[in-house]
Every structure is written in C-alpha cells, then in structure tokens.
Image: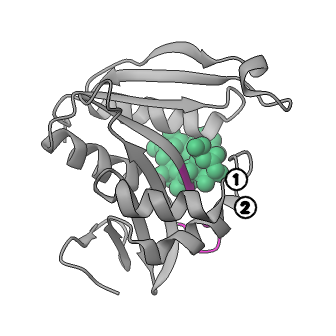
C-alpha cells in the first residue's frame, strides 16, 4: 500500500519509507520476535504505537512486505527530544544502509517538527546499534553523551542495563 507520505530513497531502490499504520502492527510484532535482543511487547502495544506515535515512527516497505521499522516518541516531559525506542530490519529483506535510512528519515522528520535532541537506549553488547547511533550523531554534527538510564536491577529478569545515548539534533550535514 502506498500513501502520500511515502519516501523513496535513491540509495535503496524498491524501498519505501512511511509512518506506520495499525495495519503494520502484526508484522512489526512478528519482526521483534525474530530480532533478539529486542524486548517483545504485546501486539496490543504495537497497535497503540502505530495509532498514537505514527508521526514519530517509520516503517520500510519492500515488495509490500515490512523490511524494517523504528518506533519513536516525543516524551511529554521533554517534547524537544525525539526518543528512538525500538528498531529492527528483516534479514531476508534488508540491504546495507536500511536501518540508517530509517533513522535518518524519522530523525529529520522529528527535527522539522521541532525536536532538538536525539535519545535512544541500547543494550551495551549491541555493537551494531551503538555504531549506528554514533554514525547518526556524526551526521547531525554531535557526539553522544552516554549514561545508564536503567540498571539491570530496575529492569529485572536478568535484563541488561539500558544505556542512554543523547546528542543534539542539528541540521544534517549532507
Ligand atoms: C541494529 C540493526 C537495526 C542495524 O540494521 P542495518 O540495516 O544492518 O544497519 P545499516 O546497514 O543501516 O548500518 C548503519 C550503520 O550501523 C552500523 N552497523 C550496522 N551493522 C553493524 C555490525 N554488524 N557491526 C558493526 N556496526 C554495524 C555501522 O556503523 C553502519 O554504518 P556503515 O555501514 O557506514 O559502517 C539490525 O542489525 C537489527 O535489526 N538488529 C536486531 C535488532 C536490534 O538490535 N535493534 C536495535 C536495538 S533497538
């Protein structure tokens, strides 16, 4: 399905980026199940996310299938921040640069809507996403501040700590 919000990226032929709709929630949930170390939330949580936070989230669609997603929101206590919550790409449909293209698209959209800071948390062992966040920070001209947001004991269940990366969301350099 194509919408008026679709963005095509020349570097990723055949891929469309757009805000999610509730029709994407089941595929997002299913991709999260296949994407360790992501926490799996209920399908209901993703339905609500796709309904209420579509403007701050993105899906990548390839051949009418979900190739990846980023969920994000603007915290009510700090609306100048765009917080990227979960992201994943489908190994069967991905291509180099897909996660970065999704992050760059939705971060740019958030900036145009008034966000001035980027935040996300990462599992400290997830090298791929740490490098991805650092690359995005370079694009926006910043170096992330790194701190622990939630300790293992707060998260429970043997969960790794959630480490916060925060940088200013300046105009992109390219
Ligand atoms: C993390 C994830 C989204 C990255 O997706 P991706 O499409 O492979 O990433 P991209 O191709 O856009 O790469 C962008 C940058 O991320 C970094 N990166 C991606 N994969 C990497 C890896 N295996 N090792 C090191 N750095 C990596 C690099 O900096 C890369 O830029 P470069 O190619 O110029 O060096 C993907 O691996 C994934 O779905 N993982 C499982 C779920 C997850 O961990 N999600 C993130 C936590 S919320």
Which contiguous range is marked in magenta? Answer: 87-94
Q: Main secondary structure of the magenta part?
A: loop
- Residue 103 placement, left or right of 151: left
Secondary structure beneath label 2: helix
Q: Quadrant of the C terminus?
A: top left
Secondary structure beneath label 1: loop
On residue 105, the disc is none
Which residue is at the front of the view, 123 or 137? 123
Where is residue 166 drawn, in percent x and y?
40, 21
**Can residue 31 be found in the magenta stretch?**
no
Where is residue 118 drawn, in percent x and y?
34, 30
Q: Earlier in the sequence, mark 1 or mark 2?
A: 2
Where is residue 120 drawn, in percent x and y?
47, 32
Residue that numbered label 1 is attached to = 40
- Residue 119 placement, left or right of 89: left
Q: Are marks 1 and 2 in contact (CB under 8 Å)?
A: yes
Which image quadrant is residue 119 in?
top left
Where is residue 58 drawn, in percent x and y?
37, 59
**Can residue 89 be found in the magenta stretch?**
yes
- Residue 89 placement, left or right of 38: left
> Residue 10, relative to residue 158: is it above or below?
below
Give the spatial CA distance, label 1 vs label 2.
Answer: 6 Å
């Amino acid at each position: 399905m194509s919408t008026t919000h679709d963005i095509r990226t020349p570097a990723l032929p055949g891929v469309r980026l757009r805000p999610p709709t509730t029709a994407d929630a089941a595929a997002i949930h299913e991709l999260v199940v296949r994407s360790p170390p992501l926490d799996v939330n209920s399908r209901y949580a993703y339905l609500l996310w796709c309904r209420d936070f579509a403007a701050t989230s993105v899906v990548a669609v390839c051949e009418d299938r979900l190739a990846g997603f980023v969920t994000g929101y603007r915290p009510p206590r700090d609306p100048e921040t765009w917080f990227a919550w979960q992201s994943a790409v489908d190994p069967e449909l991905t291509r180099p640069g897909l996660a970065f293209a999704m992050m760059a698209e939705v971060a740019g959209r958030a900036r145009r809507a008034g966000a001035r800071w980027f935040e996300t948390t990462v599992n400290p062992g997830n090298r791929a996403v740490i490098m991805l966040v650092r690359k995005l920070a370079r694009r926006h001209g910043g170096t992330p501040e790194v701190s622990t947001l939630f300790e293992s004991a707060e998260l429970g269940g043997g969960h790794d700590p959630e480490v916060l990366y925060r940088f200013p969301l300046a105009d992109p350099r390219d």
